[in-house]
Amino acid sequence: MSRPRTASLTLTTLAGLAAAATLAGAARADVLDTVKASGVVKCGVTLAAPGFSAEDNAGRRQGFDVDLCKAIAAATLGDASKIQLVPMDLKTAFAGLPGGAVDVLTHRFTWTQSRDVGGLKFAKVMFFDGQGFAVTKKSKANKIADLNNATICTAQGSTSELIVADYFRAHNLKYKIVTFSSQEQAWDAFIGNRCDAAINDRSGLAARLSKLPNRDDFKVLAETVSNEPISPIVAQGQPRWEALVRFTLNALVAAEELGITQANVDEQLKSQSPDVQRLLGVSGDLGAKLGVGNDWAYKAIKAVGNYGDVWERNLGAKTPLQLDRGRNALVANGGLMMSIPVR
Protein backbone atom coordinates (compact mmCIF):
# COMPACT_ATOMS: atom_id res chain seq x y z
CA MET A 1 0.00 0.00 0.00
CA SER A 2 1.02 3.57 -0.23
CA ARG A 3 3.19 4.73 2.64
CA PRO A 4 3.19 7.82 4.88
CA ARG A 5 5.99 10.04 3.53
CA THR A 6 7.86 11.11 6.66
CA ALA A 7 10.74 12.24 4.44
CA SER A 8 8.62 15.15 3.27
CA LEU A 9 8.04 16.51 6.76
CA THR A 10 9.92 19.53 7.95
CA LEU A 11 12.94 18.82 10.10
CA THR A 12 11.15 20.30 13.09
CA THR A 13 8.11 18.07 12.63
CA LEU A 14 10.22 14.98 12.02
CA ALA A 15 12.27 15.66 15.13
CA GLY A 16 9.09 16.12 17.14
CA LEU A 17 7.66 12.83 15.92
CA ALA A 18 10.90 11.03 16.71
CA ALA A 19 11.01 12.48 20.22
CA ALA A 20 7.37 11.61 20.86
CA ALA A 21 7.87 8.05 19.63
CA THR A 22 10.97 7.65 21.77
CA LEU A 23 9.19 8.88 24.89
CA ALA A 24 6.18 6.70 24.20
CA GLY A 25 8.39 3.66 23.65
CA ALA A 26 10.34 4.34 26.82
CA ALA A 27 7.15 4.75 28.86
CA ARG A 28 5.48 1.62 27.52
CA ALA A 29 5.85 -1.61 29.44
CA ASP A 30 7.76 -4.51 27.92
CA VAL A 31 5.57 -5.59 25.01
CA LEU A 32 6.52 -9.26 25.17
CA ASP A 33 5.47 -9.41 28.82
CA THR A 34 2.29 -7.51 28.02
CA VAL A 35 1.37 -9.86 25.18
CA LYS A 36 1.93 -12.90 27.38
CA ALA A 37 -0.16 -11.41 30.16
CA SER A 38 -3.03 -10.38 27.88
CA GLY A 39 -2.96 -13.57 25.85
CA VAL A 40 -3.39 -11.75 22.54
CA VAL A 41 -1.22 -10.18 19.85
CA LYS A 42 -2.67 -6.95 18.47
CA CYS A 43 -1.74 -6.45 14.82
CA GLY A 44 -2.33 -3.35 12.74
CA VAL A 45 -3.38 -4.35 9.23
CA THR A 46 -4.44 -2.53 6.09
CA LEU A 47 -8.10 -1.69 5.69
CA ALA A 48 -8.92 -3.71 2.60
CA ALA A 49 -6.34 -5.23 0.27
CA PRO A 50 -7.27 -8.65 -1.15
CA GLY A 51 -4.47 -11.14 -0.72
CA PHE A 52 -2.95 -9.11 2.10
CA SER A 53 -5.75 -8.19 4.52
CA ALA A 54 -9.40 -8.28 3.53
CA GLU A 55 -12.62 -9.90 4.69
CA ASP A 56 -13.81 -13.01 2.90
CA ASN A 57 -17.46 -13.84 2.18
CA ALA A 58 -17.90 -15.07 5.75
CA GLY A 59 -16.59 -11.82 7.21
CA ARG A 60 -13.24 -13.32 8.28
CA ARG A 61 -10.16 -11.25 7.58
CA GLN A 62 -7.59 -13.23 5.59
CA GLY A 63 -4.33 -12.58 3.77
CA PHE A 64 -0.54 -12.50 3.73
CA ASP A 65 -0.31 -9.85 6.46
CA VAL A 66 -2.85 -11.70 8.61
CA ASP A 67 -0.82 -14.90 8.35
CA LEU A 68 2.27 -13.05 9.56
CA CYS A 69 0.28 -11.97 12.60
CA LYS A 70 -0.88 -15.55 13.20
CA ALA A 71 2.71 -16.79 13.03
CA ILE A 72 3.77 -14.26 15.68
CA ALA A 73 0.89 -15.30 17.95
CA ALA A 74 1.69 -18.98 17.51
CA ALA A 75 5.35 -18.39 18.38
CA THR A 76 4.56 -16.18 21.37
CA LEU A 77 1.39 -17.73 22.80
CA GLY A 78 1.28 -21.14 21.17
CA ASP A 79 -2.03 -20.37 19.47
CA ALA A 80 -2.40 -18.66 16.09
CA SER A 81 -6.00 -17.71 16.85
CA LYS A 82 -5.00 -15.41 19.71
CA ILE A 83 -4.82 -12.30 17.57
CA GLN A 84 -6.67 -9.02 17.43
CA LEU A 85 -6.65 -7.47 13.98
CA VAL A 86 -6.93 -3.68 13.93
CA PRO A 87 -7.61 -2.25 10.45
CA MET A 88 -5.70 1.04 10.18
CA ASP A 89 -5.30 3.76 7.60
CA LEU A 90 -2.12 5.68 6.85
CA LYS A 91 -2.59 8.20 9.63
CA THR A 92 -3.65 5.93 12.48
CA ALA A 93 -1.11 3.17 11.91
CA PHE A 94 2.04 5.02 12.91
CA ALA A 95 0.26 7.03 15.61
CA GLY A 96 -1.16 3.91 17.26
CA LEU A 97 2.02 1.85 17.48
CA PRO A 98 4.09 3.73 20.12
CA GLY A 99 1.18 4.08 22.53
CA GLY A 100 0.17 0.44 22.43
CA ALA A 101 -2.95 0.51 20.26
CA VAL A 102 -1.24 -2.36 18.45
CA ASP A 103 1.82 -4.48 19.22
CA VAL A 104 3.04 -4.83 15.66
CA LEU A 105 2.17 -3.40 12.26
CA THR A 106 1.96 -6.18 9.73
CA HIS A 107 0.34 -3.49 7.59
CA ARG A 108 2.39 -3.04 4.41
CA PHE A 109 4.83 -0.18 5.00
CA THR A 110 8.13 0.61 3.32
CA TRP A 111 11.38 0.51 5.28
CA THR A 112 12.96 3.92 4.76
CA GLN A 113 15.86 5.70 6.44
CA SER A 114 13.76 8.55 7.81
CA ARG A 115 11.33 6.15 9.45
CA ASP A 116 14.05 3.95 10.86
CA VAL A 117 15.71 6.88 12.63
CA GLY A 118 12.35 8.44 13.47
CA GLY A 119 11.22 6.01 16.14
CA LEU A 120 10.06 2.95 14.17
CA LYS A 121 11.79 -0.42 14.17
CA PHE A 122 11.50 -2.64 11.12
CA ALA A 123 11.70 -6.36 11.85
CA LYS A 124 12.60 -8.00 8.53
CA VAL A 125 11.84 -7.42 4.86
CA MET A 126 9.05 -9.85 4.04
CA PHE A 127 8.02 -8.42 0.66
CA PHE A 128 10.07 -6.71 -2.03
CA ASP A 129 7.81 -4.38 -3.96
CA GLY A 130 7.96 -1.31 -6.19
CA GLN A 131 5.56 1.44 -7.20
CA GLY A 132 3.80 1.69 -10.53
CA PHE A 133 0.89 3.39 -12.25
CA ALA A 134 -2.59 2.12 -13.07
CA VAL A 135 -4.48 3.65 -15.98
CA THR A 136 -7.59 2.91 -17.98
CA LYS A 137 -7.03 1.06 -21.23
CA LYS A 138 -8.99 3.70 -23.10
CA SER A 139 -6.46 6.34 -21.99
CA LYS A 140 -3.97 5.02 -24.60
CA ALA A 141 -1.12 5.47 -22.09
CA ASN A 142 1.39 2.66 -22.61
CA LYS A 143 4.36 4.09 -20.71
CA ILE A 144 4.92 6.68 -18.00
CA ALA A 145 6.06 9.26 -20.57
CA ASP A 146 2.50 9.16 -21.90
CA LEU A 147 1.32 10.58 -18.54
CA ASN A 148 2.74 14.03 -19.28
CA ASN A 149 0.21 16.60 -18.00
CA ALA A 150 -1.79 13.82 -16.30
CA THR A 151 -3.73 14.11 -13.06
CA ILE A 152 -2.58 11.48 -10.57
CA CYS A 153 -4.46 10.24 -7.49
CA THR A 154 -2.72 9.13 -4.30
CA ALA A 155 -3.02 9.27 -0.51
CA GLN A 156 -1.98 12.43 1.29
CA GLY A 157 1.37 12.12 3.05
CA SER A 158 2.32 8.94 1.18
CA THR A 159 5.70 8.09 -0.27
CA SER A 160 3.94 8.14 -3.64
CA GLU A 161 3.82 11.94 -3.54
CA LEU A 162 7.60 12.15 -3.32
CA ILE A 163 8.10 9.39 -5.90
CA VAL A 164 5.86 11.15 -8.44
CA ALA A 165 7.57 14.50 -7.82
CA ASP A 166 11.07 13.05 -8.18
CA TYR A 167 10.32 10.92 -11.24
CA PHE A 168 8.38 13.53 -13.20
CA ARG A 169 10.92 16.25 -12.44
CA ALA A 170 13.81 14.02 -13.49
CA HIS A 171 12.07 13.18 -16.78
CA ASN A 172 10.81 16.72 -17.52
CA LEU A 173 7.18 15.68 -17.28
CA LYS A 174 4.32 17.79 -15.98
CA TYR A 175 1.57 16.49 -13.73
CA LYS A 176 -1.08 17.44 -11.21
CA ILE A 177 -1.26 15.48 -7.95
CA VAL A 178 -4.64 15.04 -6.24
CA THR A 179 -4.41 13.69 -2.70
CA PHE A 180 -6.99 12.05 -0.44
CA SER A 181 -7.02 11.11 3.23
CA SER A 182 -6.66 7.40 2.50
CA GLN A 183 -5.45 5.15 -0.29
CA GLU A 184 -8.96 3.72 -0.53
CA GLN A 185 -10.39 7.18 -1.28
CA ALA A 186 -7.65 7.83 -3.81
CA TRP A 187 -8.41 4.57 -5.58
CA ASP A 188 -12.14 5.25 -5.62
CA ALA A 189 -11.45 8.66 -7.15
CA PHE A 190 -9.37 7.05 -9.89
CA ILE A 191 -12.06 4.47 -10.62
CA GLY A 192 -14.56 7.33 -10.69
CA ASN A 193 -12.55 9.05 -13.47
CA ARG A 194 -11.43 11.96 -11.30
CA CYS A 195 -7.79 11.21 -12.20
CA ASP A 196 -5.92 9.93 -15.22
CA ALA A 197 -3.77 7.52 -13.19
CA ALA A 198 -3.27 6.08 -9.72
CA ILE A 199 0.11 5.27 -8.18
CA ASN A 200 0.68 2.56 -5.59
CA ASP A 201 2.85 -0.46 -4.93
CA ARG A 202 2.44 -2.86 -7.82
CA SER A 203 1.11 -5.57 -5.51
CA GLY A 204 -1.40 -3.08 -4.12
CA LEU A 205 -2.57 -2.19 -7.60
CA ALA A 206 -2.98 -5.88 -8.41
CA ALA A 207 -4.99 -6.38 -5.22
CA ARG A 208 -7.32 -3.50 -5.96
CA LEU A 209 -7.79 -4.46 -9.59
CA SER A 210 -8.69 -8.01 -8.53
CA LYS A 211 -11.84 -6.67 -6.86
CA LEU A 212 -13.20 -4.84 -9.90
CA PRO A 213 -15.90 -6.48 -12.01
CA ASN A 214 -14.56 -4.49 -14.97
CA ARG A 215 -10.90 -5.17 -14.21
CA ASP A 216 -10.19 -5.69 -17.93
CA ASP A 217 -10.87 -1.99 -18.46
CA PHE A 218 -7.65 -1.14 -16.58
CA LYS A 219 -3.98 -1.96 -16.77
CA VAL A 220 -0.76 -1.36 -14.86
CA LEU A 221 2.05 0.25 -16.84
CA ALA A 222 5.16 -1.92 -17.15
CA GLU A 223 7.66 0.46 -15.54
CA THR A 224 8.47 0.23 -11.84
CA VAL A 225 9.57 3.59 -10.44
CA SER A 226 10.82 2.72 -6.95
CA ASN A 227 12.12 0.04 -4.63
CA GLU A 228 9.78 -0.68 -1.74
CA PRO A 229 11.16 -3.14 0.85
CA ILE A 230 8.15 -3.95 3.02
CA SER A 231 8.63 -4.92 6.65
CA PRO A 232 6.44 -5.40 9.72
CA ILE A 233 7.12 -2.70 12.32
CA VAL A 234 7.37 -2.57 16.10
CA ALA A 235 7.82 0.38 18.43
CA GLN A 236 11.25 1.69 19.33
CA GLY A 237 12.66 0.68 22.71
CA GLN A 238 11.29 -2.89 22.69
CA PRO A 239 14.34 -5.06 21.89
CA ARG A 240 12.85 -8.34 23.18
CA TRP A 241 9.65 -7.98 21.19
CA GLU A 242 11.53 -6.74 18.13
CA ALA A 243 13.80 -9.81 18.22
CA LEU A 244 10.88 -12.22 18.62
CA VAL A 245 8.96 -10.69 15.71
CA ARG A 246 12.09 -10.65 13.53
CA PHE A 247 13.06 -14.25 14.14
CA THR A 248 9.53 -15.60 13.93
CA LEU A 249 9.25 -14.14 10.44
CA ASN A 250 12.79 -15.30 9.72
CA ALA A 251 11.77 -18.84 10.72
CA LEU A 252 9.19 -18.94 7.92
CA VAL A 253 11.87 -18.11 5.36
CA ALA A 254 14.37 -20.54 6.90
CA ALA A 255 11.74 -23.27 6.81
CA GLU A 256 11.28 -22.84 3.06
CA GLU A 257 15.05 -22.95 2.56
CA LEU A 258 15.20 -26.20 4.54
CA GLY A 259 12.19 -27.80 2.85
CA ILE A 260 10.02 -27.69 5.97
CA THR A 261 6.33 -27.11 5.20
CA GLN A 262 3.12 -26.91 7.16
CA ALA A 263 2.34 -30.42 5.89
CA ASN A 264 5.63 -32.07 6.86
CA VAL A 265 6.74 -30.12 9.93
CA ASP A 266 5.82 -32.95 12.35
CA GLU A 267 7.83 -35.42 10.32
CA GLN A 268 10.73 -32.98 10.21
CA LEU A 269 10.98 -33.16 14.01
CA LYS A 270 12.79 -36.45 13.39
CA SER A 271 15.30 -34.93 10.99
CA GLN A 272 18.98 -35.45 11.71
CA SER A 273 19.90 -32.11 10.14
CA PRO A 274 21.42 -29.81 12.78
CA ASP A 275 19.85 -26.79 11.05
CA VAL A 276 16.39 -28.36 11.15
CA GLN A 277 16.84 -29.46 14.76
CA ARG A 278 17.81 -25.96 15.87
CA LEU A 279 14.98 -24.31 13.96
CA LEU A 280 12.30 -26.63 15.32
CA GLY A 281 13.67 -26.58 18.87
CA VAL A 282 14.70 -30.22 18.96
CA SER A 283 18.16 -29.02 20.02
CA GLY A 284 19.53 -25.78 21.36
CA ASP A 285 17.85 -23.01 23.34
CA LEU A 286 17.17 -20.32 20.74
CA GLY A 287 13.56 -19.97 21.84
CA ALA A 288 14.50 -19.50 25.47
CA LYS A 289 16.87 -16.72 24.44
CA LEU A 290 13.91 -15.00 22.76
CA GLY A 291 11.75 -15.35 25.86
CA VAL A 292 9.48 -18.10 24.53
CA GLY A 293 9.50 -21.89 24.28
CA ASN A 294 12.16 -23.60 22.20
CA ASP A 295 9.39 -24.87 19.89
CA TRP A 296 8.42 -21.29 18.92
CA ALA A 297 9.37 -21.75 15.26
CA TYR A 298 7.72 -25.17 15.07
CA LYS A 299 4.46 -23.65 16.29
CA ALA A 300 4.67 -20.76 13.81
CA ILE A 301 5.34 -23.11 10.88
CA LYS A 302 2.64 -25.53 12.04
CA ALA A 303 0.19 -22.62 12.13
CA VAL A 304 0.82 -20.97 8.75
CA GLY A 305 3.51 -22.96 6.91
CA ASN A 306 6.75 -21.65 5.48
CA TYR A 307 7.15 -18.41 3.54
CA GLY A 308 6.30 -20.15 0.26
CA ASP A 309 3.17 -21.69 1.79
CA VAL A 310 2.01 -18.25 2.96
CA TRP A 311 2.73 -16.76 -0.46
CA GLU A 312 0.93 -19.41 -2.49
CA ARG A 313 -2.11 -19.46 -0.22
CA ASN A 314 -2.65 -15.71 -0.43
CA LEU A 315 -0.91 -14.34 -3.52
CA GLY A 316 0.11 -17.22 -5.75
CA ALA A 317 -1.03 -18.77 -9.01
CA LYS A 318 -4.29 -20.19 -7.61
CA THR A 319 -5.42 -16.86 -6.13
CA PRO A 320 -7.09 -13.89 -7.85
CA LEU A 321 -3.84 -11.89 -7.63
CA GLN A 322 -1.67 -14.55 -9.34
CA LEU A 323 1.51 -12.76 -8.30
CA ASP A 324 4.81 -14.17 -9.50
CA ARG A 325 7.39 -14.55 -6.74
CA GLY A 326 9.94 -12.47 -8.70
CA ARG A 327 12.31 -10.75 -6.27
CA ASN A 328 10.48 -12.50 -3.43
CA ALA A 329 11.78 -15.90 -4.50
CA LEU A 330 14.50 -17.45 -2.39
CA VAL A 331 18.06 -16.44 -3.22
CA ALA A 332 18.66 -20.05 -4.29
CA ASN A 333 15.93 -19.56 -6.90
CA GLY A 334 17.17 -16.21 -8.21
CA GLY A 335 15.27 -13.92 -5.84
CA LEU A 336 16.24 -11.74 -2.88
CA MET A 337 14.56 -13.58 -0.01
CA MET A 338 16.90 -15.26 2.47
CA SER A 339 16.97 -16.07 6.15
CA ILE A 340 19.30 -14.95 8.88
CA PRO A 341 21.19 -18.13 9.88
CA VAL A 342 19.37 -19.96 12.69
CA ARG A 343 22.30 -20.78 14.93
Image: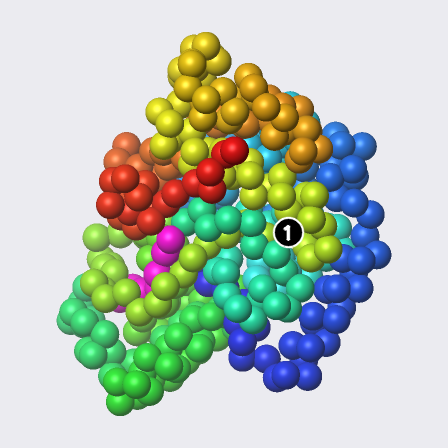
Q: Which residues are magenta?
A: 128-136
Figure check: 152 above or below 277:
below
The answer to which of 51 and 36 lies nearer the viewer is 36
The spot of residue 316 in percent (x, y) is 30, 37
Left or right: residue 90 compared with residue 26:
left
Residue 272, image x, y percentages: 42, 14
Quadrant location of residue 75? top right
Residue name at image x 76 percent, y 57 percent? 25
The answer to which of 132 and 266 lies nearer the viewer is: 266
Q: Is residue 131 magenta?
A: yes
As for residue 108 lying within the magenta part, the answer is: no
Compared with 33, 231 (above or below) is below
Image quadrant for the N terminus? bottom left
31 relative position to 211: left or right: right
Task: Determine which quarter of the picture holds residue 13.
Answer: bottom right
Res 191 seen here: no
Instruction: Please say which color scheme the image uses.
Output: rainbow
